Amino acid sequence: MESLKYISDGSHETCGGSSHISRRTLFKGAGLSWLTSLSQQLAIAENNAISRPKSVIVIWLQGGASQLETFDPHPGSPISFGGKSINTAVKGIQFAEGLPQTAELMNEFSVIRSVVSDEGDHARATHQIKTGYRPFPGLIHPSIGAIVCHETAPINGAPALIDIPTHVSILPRKFPGRGGYLGAEFDAFKVGDPTRPVPDLKSLVSPVRQASRLSSLEVLETSFAATRLPGLESERTLHRSLMDRARQMMNSDQLSAFDVNQAPQAEIDSYGNSPFGRGCLAALRLIDCGVRCVEVTLNGWDTHINNLDGQSTQAALLDPALAALIHGLKARDLYNDTVFLVGTEFGRTPKINLTEGRDHWPHGFSVLLGGGGLRGGLAIGATDPTGESETPDNPVKVADIHATVLQTLGIDPTYEMTTPIGRPLAISDGRVIKELL
């Protein structure tokens, strides 16, 4: 039987599907005899929707996307080196010419053009951008997706809200979202191109043999639990809990959310004919199914050589997918329940190197934030069009972005957790960007 859910406007939809019956559609042409029963059903649906935790989608531009060839062009300036720009839907804000579909949606999100980071190395910068903290010896900070899943996880033995993982990374290359000190159970579940089946979900033996193996495993698990300290015999081991969750996932109808082949071909095509585009469509389907965080990676932005062509190639993959994702979230009435973030390790240097590339630049680069009730149509901060200054106007720290996203998701960024080394540590030490609220 198909898994059904209520979404934010009280509509009723198949998890992962594309059919949509909204409240407006139901009322349109409905006779008065429907109203009493219908209003009761809508009241139930909306009461359920009130408690729905918000979700986050992270679009990760791995390698260091150039702000100058994406969201912060300076056409005609000494640092543009031939890059051109186009107008967006907001007067006075321009994007690079390779992002026409995204530019048309500028009213729906905001761009922070003055992000500053402390790290210029790929691994260290990735850690800081994804966790809000610089790397620290002996402590692995959780990614923002792990925090969201931890804070919205069932408590006191309550059953899981969905059968599939709530933290998913699509097309990860390096450093996918980690649970850090929250534990490996909050690591992102990694999948590849969504046109391919999720691996390792089909048993390699017959059902009879599989049942026999599981029975033998239960004997071992029970025997192991009996050797634990008094009072802990009844507690489930992490291994047993993970095995139970894996079996539950293997038999779940919600796995269909991963399979973009079930979507209409026109919808698939609207995201662009690329693994990344299909990953963004899968992200929409997973969020619609109740997944709390999905990270989709677009690799290839590390353009130390031939920067303009390299950035243009990647922008052509990003543009249709990002625009279609925004349209998809709005069409399913998920936009106000979902924060999306487009981020990268750092920007690229204003000056071109000897191989016509741009090198690493953490002193002022761009991040997009939208959805979740955040204000759209803003450009926050500004970088120097001459490339001489390393300090942008109105600099925004990486931690500030985390604090803003967490606040928007209903999570107190100042809440302190106790790390494994006994140190109290706030989820974020940044300030909320008030302009976006």
Image (tube, grey):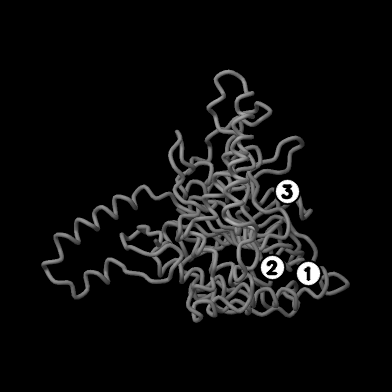
Mark 1 Cα within 10 Å, few/some/many (few <14, many 20+)?
many
Question: Do we see residue 382 in this rendering?
Answer: no
Examine the rendered structure and indicate whether residue 350 appears above or below residue 47: below
Which residue carries the number 2 mark? Answer: 385
Q: Amino acid at mark 2?
A: Pro
Disc 3 + disc 2, Cβ < 8 Å: no
- Which is more N-terminal, label 3 or label 1? 3
- Which numbered marker is on residue 303? 1
Instruction: Specify the quadrant of the image occupied by residue 300.
Output: bottom right
Q: Is residue 209 left or right of residue 81?
A: left
Which residue carries the number 3 mark? Answer: 118
- Which is more N-terminal, label 2 or label 1? 1
Instruction: Decide which of 331, 306 is in the foreground and name it.
Output: 331
- Which is more N-terminal, label 2 or label 3? 3
- How far apart in space, not on screen, are marks 1 and 3 (Cα)? 20 Å
The image position of residue 326, as x and y in percent, is 49, 68
Which residue shows up at 49% across the image and 64% down it? Answer: 285
In the structure shown, which secondary structural element does the residue marked by tag 1 occupy?
Answer: loop
Question: Which of labels 1 and 3 is toward the front?
Answer: 1
- How far apart in space, not on screen, are marks 3 and 2 (Cα)? 22 Å
The image position of residue 363, as x and y in percent, is 72, 56
